[in-house]
Image (tube, helix red, strand yellow):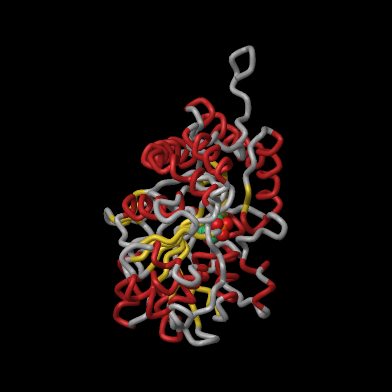
Amino acid sequence: MAPDGQVLAPNLHESESIPEAARAEIDRLLSSGDLFRYTAPSDAPVALLEKEFAELLGARFALAVSSCSAALFLCLKALDLPKGAKVLIPAFTFAAVPSSVVHAECEPVLVEVGANYRVDMADFAAKLPQASAVLISHMRGHTSDMDAIMALCDAAGVPVIEDAAHSLGTLWSGRQIGTIGKAGCFSFQSYKLVNAGEGGIMVTDDPEIAARAIIMSGAYEENWKKHPGLSNSCAHWQNKLPLYNLRMQNLSAAVIRPQLPLVADRVTKGRANYDHVAAQLNDCPHLVVPPALPGEERAPDSIQFNLKGEWSDDEARALQAAAKARGVTVQVFGLSDGNARAFWNWQFLGDVPELPQTRAMLMRACDVRLPTRLSQAELDFVAGVILDAVAEVKG
Ligand SMILES: *Cc1c(COP(=O)(O)O)cnc(C)c1O
């Protein structure tokens, strides 16, 4: 707040401080040097995190690893797909997602996404027959129609992995996102709801998937004995699977654990913040915030909206510049150079296919961070800047 009472542009990239409880635990770990998850005979911070996270999500097993991308990779490996197997992914996702498929020696097949950021079910159904697995990214928490996806995949016998990296706390028909498919993966990278700098976790109810992922994450020799309830499966797979060593270390768990009790409150705040800003943007004839599907209860910490009606690329760029000049970063996914969420930048795929519907969406979809800590005045400031910028461009 400025001295005259005016609200200043909030810093949308600043993190919240980590709960004080983390400090004592980190001190204890630094004093003892006990940083490796498998040194302590029991109750290592990483093991406790897995127990608490599984309880939070209502899942049987959780495995904490170095990133959500590592978790996605391990899930795909745990499915034991043949080399070159086709894996459907939405064409609107983060570059790390097709990368995890390539890393698992599979071939990503991109599925069209609609103007509402969700998987286009007609294109999905058309491409499913060639797929050995499906990896659904709930991009920015926008949940695709999981009932339709699960019905098609169950009928075809195709396993579904959920990339819930940025969706912790989102519900689909009352169920936690990430617990609907065979396995779900979450991120603790700094821009997500729980911030450890880096880190990821996978959840599953399937003991075979859990056991295989645990071994491959680097539970060498008999370290898998420190994962409860999986002795038979793990004993079976020991020494039969490669060790990729993607483990989480105790310091990360010490940073994450005290944030888990805050998730529910962050979800409630994020939802209210989002609704507050969305209502103001939807009042503008040049903007539209796509509604959630009926089954979805969101946990947003950012907002996406589309430029509605006729907008040229130059006008969209002018909007970004006008908002920036007022202190708010509006990112049009397809217009920021080299954006990692624009599929045409995924040159590592070789021939990147064309997906006209997803491209059209990316060229007019705007992304603004809305950290859950923002005050009402700060939210109004952000919404006001966007509306002023639209007015400047559209007159
Ligand atoms: C952040 C993110 C990832 C990658 O998570 P990391 O922990 O950084 O590997 C993957 N998918 C989506 C949708 C994300 O938002």
Q: Quadrant of ligand 1?
A: bottom right
Q: Is residue 8 left or right of residue 57?
A: right
Q: Residue 393 or 128: which is nearer the viewer?
A: 128
Q: Position of residue 341 (x, y in %)?
A: 60, 60
| Residue 344 in which image quadrant | bottom right
Q: Where residue 147 appears, x then y in whole percent?
A: 30, 66
Residue at point 48%, 72% (across, down): 221
Toward the viewer: 71 or 223? 223
Quadrant of the image occupied by residue 348: bottom right
Q: Is residue 106 left or right of residue 271?
A: right
* Location of the C terminus (image quadrant): top right
Number of numbered labels in the structure image: 0
Is residue 141 at least partly visible in the picture? no
Is 138 in front, or is 148? Answer: 138
| Residue with the most extreme left position | 174
Q: Is residue 30 visible?
A: yes
Residue 151 in the image: above or below residue 228: below
Residue 243 locus on image (x, y percent): 54, 74
Q: Identify the residue at horizontal 59%, vertical 75% (top origin).
A: 103
47 lies left or right of 189: left
Quarter of the image with the N terminus is top right
Image x and y of residue 350, in percent: 68, 79
Residues 201 and 20: in front is: 20
